[in-house]
Amino acid sequence: MSSTFLYIILAILVFEYILERILAYLNSTYWSDHLPKELIGIYDEEKYKKSMAYEKQKQKFGLVVNTLTFLAMLVVLTLGGFGWLDHFIRNYTENPFLMALLFFGMLGLVSSILSIPFELYHVFVLEEKFGFNRTTPKTFILDKIKGLVIGAIIGGGLLLLIIYIYLSTGNYFWIIAWVVIACFMIFMTMFYSNLIVPLFNKQKPLEPGTLRVAIEAFAIKVGFKLKNIYVIDGSKRSKRANAYFTGLGMKKRIVLYDTLITDHTTEELVAVLAHEIGHYKKKHTTLSIILSLLQTGLMLFILSLFIRRESPLSQMLCQSLSGFAGIGIKQSFHMGILAFGLLYSPLSLILGILLNMLSRANEYQADRYAGLKYNPESLQNALKKLSVNNLSNLRPHPVYVFFYYSHPSLLQRLSALEKLKEQ
């Protein structure tokens, strides 16, 4: 039976790799060497060719990374690499807490080290070539160190807590674990910008002036209580622009990238903020949190069925990670959760597609809100400018959009706003 789980995991990996390649190919069939007529007025000929060159190089880079990752996973799984690591750790400790920390810590560290060459190429070659990168080597190194430390503290702490719950409560551990993780997710939603973001970026209140007056006037007009408007130094790492809404209740805040302010007019910026406020007014933020919590609960419930202590199913699941090497693997939480994560991948893909569908519908609603409450043309101009400045692919294949896009394509959003203007 353990070999059956192994074959299923290998089949899932092969399926996902082939699916990625098919979707990438379909997307490439919509590329053109000349400016398509539907993009006239958005891109000029030279800028469009640059965006296509960027898209092609991104795809080549993605092909290399995905293929190497796929092959590495096949080798590790078939040769029982995870089993060997488990045996190595058991030579030093049988404590379930230490075993899990060492197991996932070593996997995370090795994965992080192996990814560095690809990250360096992406940031300092690919992004640099097309004029996006502003990251210095010092910033890159500090980001990696901070990321590893924060991941170890938060991830390690949660892991230890969940293992404790698992060992203490038995088969229904998932309920208590769900409550703990839910509290953590809500806490991070409220305080992420206060606790984590300052470790990487500087945030400062938007200075008094025309833009702040315009944003506050709009917020008052639509009955949106807004005290926290911040500017983040996104230009520290990239020329890309963005804005986002975060937090709940009194902790909610709107954050603007400094690059967004530099590249857009006051009317365009207010339109972008109107879109973000639209998400809040339409309860999209609350709905997103609820759905994330439900998805987490579902995952934990299914996990609990697979890793019941001393159950034959749990033992076979762990043994599947011995590959074809025939290594004897003892049942443990860390091995069980790793194997389950690989088996859970198809369901995660399906849930991701459904959530993307909902997200795209929410984006249309937020666009409509901004168009009705402020100005559809200003939002159109902002969306065009954002897409062009980011060299976005404005003609993605519909199937590619269906699988991967959390937002409608630019042309779809512009069309919806155009219909709104005609009403």
Image (tube, rainbow, N blue to C red):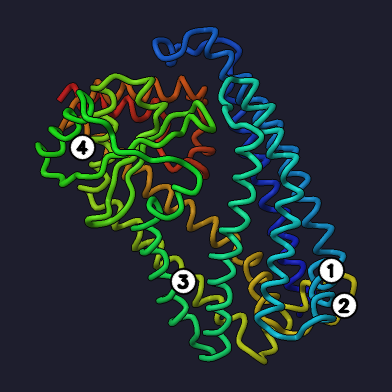
Tag 2–tag 1 contact (CB < 8 Å): yes
Q: Where does residue 252 sit, x and y in percent of width and height?
A: 27, 51
The answer for how far apart the CA atoms under marks 2 and 3 are is: 32 Å
Task: Indicate the secondary structure of the residue bearing disc 2.
Answer: loop
Is 315 rendered above or below residue 372? Answer: below
* Residue at the image position 23 percent from the left and 35 percent from the top: 274
Label 4 amino acid?
Tyr
Task: Name, please, the residue furthest toward the right.
Answer: 325
The answer for how far apart the CA atoms under marks 2 and 4 are is: 59 Å
Label 2 amino acid?
Ile
Q: Which mark is residue 69?
A: none
User: Left of 10 or right of it: where is 225?
Assistant: left
Label 1 amino acid?
Gly
The image quarter in which residue 204 lies: top left
Query: According to the image, label 2 marks what residue?
Result: 327
Q: Earlier in the sequence, mark 2 or mark 1?
A: 1
* Residue at the image position 65 percent from the left and 30 percent from the top: 58
